[in-house]
Image: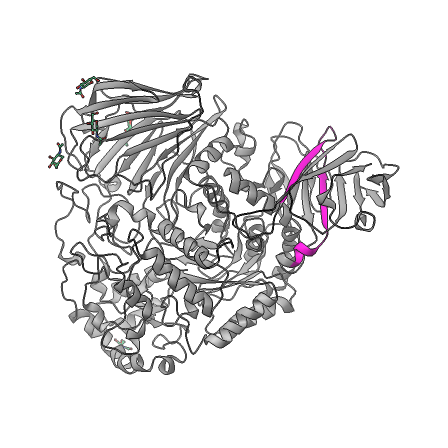
Amino acid sequence: MILSTIVIALWGFISFTTADSSNSTTDAATTSYVPIFQNAIPPALTIGVEQLPNINNDSAVDANVAAKGYSVVNITNTARGLTGILKLKSATNIYGYDFEYLNLTVEYQSEQRLNVHIEPTNLTDVFVLPDELVPKPKIDDDYDFARSDLVFEYDEEDFGFEIVRSSTGETLFSTKGNPLVFSNQFIQFNTTLPQGYAISGLGESIHGSLNEPGLVKTLFANGISNPIDQNDYGVHPVYFDQRYSSNTTHGVFWRSSAPQEVVFEETSLTWRSISGVIDLYFFSGPDPKDVITQYVSQIGLPAMQPYWALGYHQCKWGFETIDDVIDVVDNFKKFDIKLEAMWSDIDYMDSFKDFTNDPYRYPTDKYRKFLDDLHENNQHYVPIFDAGIYVPNPNNATDNDYEPFHLGNETDVFLKNPDGSLYIGSVWPGYTVFPDFLSNNTQEYFNILFKDWYNRLPFDGIWADMNEAASYCVGSCGSGRYFDNPVQRAGYRFSDQNSYPKGFNVSNATEWSSISKSIAATATSTATTISTSSSSSLSIDAKNTLAPGRGNINYPPYAINNMIGNHDLAFRQISPNATHADGTLEYDIHNLFGMLEEKAIYHALLSFRPNKRPFIIGRSTFAGAGKYTGRWGGDNFADYYMMYFSIPQAFAFGSFGLPFFGVDACGFNGNTDMELCSRWMQLASFFPFYRNHNVIKAIPQEPYRWEAVISATKTSMDVRYSLLPYYYTLLQESHVSGMPILRALSWQFPYESTLSGVDNQFFVGDVLIVTPVLEPGVNYTKGVFPGNGDIYYDYYTHERQNFTTGKNETLDAPLGHIPLHIRGGYIIPTQEPGYTTTESRQNPFGLIVALDAKGRASGKLYLDDGESVEVEESLNVDFVASNNKLVGSSFGQFKVDQPLANVTVLGVDSKPEKVLFNNNTAHFDYTNKTIFIVGLDKIVGNGTFNKEFTINW
Ligand SMILES: *[C@@H]1O[C@H](CO)[C@@H](O)[C@H](O)[C@H]1NC(C)=O
Ligand SMILES: *[C@@H]1O[C@H](CO)[C@@H](O)[C@H](O)[C@H]1NC(C)=O
Ligand SMILES: *[C@@H]1O[C@H](CO)[C@@H](O)[C@H](O)[C@H]1NC(C)=O
Ligand SMILES: *[C@@H]1O[C@H](CO)[C@@H](O)[C@H](O)[C@H]1NC(C)=O
Ligand SMILES: *[C@@H]1O[C@H](CO)[C@@H](O)[C@H](O)[C@H]1NC(C)=O
């Protein structure tokens, strides 16, 4: 759900405020992204203080040149490494007060992991990230110190350290020669990199898969629509450094929730943070997939998703009534396009209030019946949930009825101002407060409200939006101001800016009488109702000055390049000085808000459905969020470049431990068209999370809107649903090991330097390679097919391809066709597609056996009930083929009744005389060097996979 829309709306609004605000929204409506609501808060509260990002400031002091650094005064060896004291050589206090003494701790934690921890000797006024918020990687007690792959070395006089890979002698990381800067509001270290490095990671931002010289990555959560190269929804402070000179890859994770910035230069990487301590983890790999799994298994393995999550999801913002939603579900059925889950954006809410539904447009009984009907048809429903909780007007009886505020207020679960008053933000419903996930009662608060909501309207998952968390005031809007809180006017029909949702005057009679008067008054009142409040940013005039203790929290002396608005850290976000229950400042853990909310939702859902896997799709994530949530890419744009970026974005999230990823197919912001939507529905069908969603007011883009999109979508959905057993097996692999599902070619073939940064193609698991069309007006695409003597088969025709290793092959790709190839040497399980995942699971299985040059192949299948958190019974089947024989052997108790019906063997040079299944003659056809064994179910009966079986040809 949108933020750019409102950002642009607000820009429009701000730039026209000197005129007449009701005219301004009309004017802004002529831009391509029109405002959809008129924010009732005084515009001056939304602006803040203009910041000049340090990286754009030519006269800024260069800390690397000016700082004097530290020297080592003491080193003591310990059982697992060493500890020492560093002493400041001379204070320069460039962007904060320098700490005089630092403690250094180096710990060899496992064969592949080393931790370097540097913090002030005196931790008064220092934020140290607690283990409970972001768990520390654990020490492996079993490993032999001497076998460590990584070695720590340091310089004493001018302290600097390096990490060396012991097997190759290569320096992986070195701050030697550059001063360490460590002050209360600025930490910096600078490491050398080899020329022409291949580094990925450091999220999140919309970017290709490799970082390059000149790039500055800002790590600060904000809610803006997918800006290129800038900070976006979440923060993942980790990078992966792939070195073709030695064919090794390592990873570096800074376990810090602070606002950060990373500068990439020709041969160096400079990492800055404006709070916290240094807590670096080095992962030695040596292959890219090793590094990723080593990292992900430490931050938290991804949640196992329910089986149904792999089905197709449909959403749109702007379904005015429940009937609109019902129509869409019916249309899918009518056009026979698969639909697993229907979603709702904020339309369903009563004036955008969490835990409510509009009594007139989404009346509970009709809404409830709709959900019951969906469930009857094995379909699912996922509503949006926003981070801000509406603050009702205590002087207005119907408004003041809003229990979620009162319950939270009574149990003290909301974020505070520094003076202890409620921190009042502003989001969709008007003035809001924000749950404080550091408060003891917040989990129980969520448990109660989610359960109550579920009992009324039994949803199947939650879409956690706006959880950076967004807030439109800069600073607290001001306690007390909510007494005049007008409900936001929603633009369900853009052409009628001043209209409230249909039926609003009936369902919200009290508000309506006051609001209809206030509409006319809004424009003039905005200029006069601003009264200063204790915590409003407007009262802050000190800017970018050094301050002792915690320093200048709202306007730190080092201004990171927070891309949104005028770079004020509080612009459209909860302010840095908002205060959590234990006194923790939002400044230090802003980047964790989304993850802590997703965690609380996860546990709330479990609290009333204890053994059903919670299904959550979140927007703001941090390292470890994958334990609780999947991700969609955020508010993208309906354009080809954005479709391309979905691929490197999927690689990034896979490496961040969020493999259950997908983007809004056909594009969110702006109008899509037939060709783009056709291409995108096909590309998106290979992403683990497959959803189409778009913004209010943009033309509808359900796949049935265009004939060509219908057929393209059906083709790809049939492929996807056939592959569900394969995808589920990959989901489970990522859940137990951290292995991504969509994989870069450079991860699959780590020693082929020409594949570095290839991100117009991807692998699904190890087997399938997808080569999409990413531009308009063409009927071909290009891709590479790596490996030395590897065989690739066309998925659709089964034909063996004559690809040349290293050559860019041109592939036919008329509209409606997305090239898909199978790599020889693998076996994938399939199942006949049904309308839903539940129906698909009732159908017979198949196997695709793609032989390599030596006639061999292998693969596996994982199955369980598809929904248990604690899986008691599961089934693993291993498939191995060689010498014209396939053996399937299984272990585990989970029973599958469905038979194996078809086996397709690709790459068989001559027609076999006969095919035997467990010594019974099986029917088969042979064409194109492919054996099609069909109708096996007639001779094998049910439950083939529960026993060992053999097929000979
Ligand atoms: C809009 O602007 C016009 C021209 O300045 C003015 O006459 C009118 O009163 C304004 N307000 C509305 C609501 O149209
Ligand atoms: C990092 O260190 C290198 C080598 O000393 C230097 O050239 C570069 O300017 C430094 N970068 C920053 C951002 O300080
Ligand atoms: C250095 O270590 C020695 C012995 O471990 C200890 O006696 C001494 O106090 C330490 N010096 C400092 C400055 O910490
Ligand atoms: C730093 O080390 C000193 C000396 O070993 C110790 O007294 C002090 O408690 C340490 N500080 C922290 C924050 O661990
Ligand atoms: C730590 O720093 C605080 C604040 O500067 C100071 O009050 C305190 O005395 C210091 N503690 C020690 C042990 O030096």
Image quarter of the N terminus: bottom left
Q: Is residue 721 visible?
A: yes
Q: Residue at x 41, y 57 (%)?
A: 604
| Residue 753 shown in magenta | no
| Residue 842 shown in magenta | yes
Ligand 5 is found in the corner quadrant, namely top left
| Image: magenta residue range | 839-862
**Residue 596 locus on image (x, y percent):** 36, 50
Q: Residue at x 69, y 56 (%)?
A: 842
Q: Is residue 418 left or right of residue 781?
A: left
Q: Quadrant of residue 335?
A: bottom right
Which of the colour schemes (rainbow, by chain, secondary structure, one colour) is used?
one colour
Task: Name the residue nearer the viewer: 495 or 241.
Answer: 241
Q: How many marks?
A: 0
**Residue 110 locus on image (x, y percent):** 42, 26
Task: Name the residue nearer the viewer: 63 or 915.
Answer: 915
Q: Is residue 761 visible?
A: no
Q: Quadrant of residue 238?
A: top left
Q: Is residue 413 left or right of residue 854?
A: left
Figure check: 514 above or below 340: below
**Residue 20 locus on image (x, y percent):** 24, 72
**Residue 346 locus on image (x, y percent):** 41, 66
Image quarter of the C terminus: top right
Figure check: 734 above or below 139: below
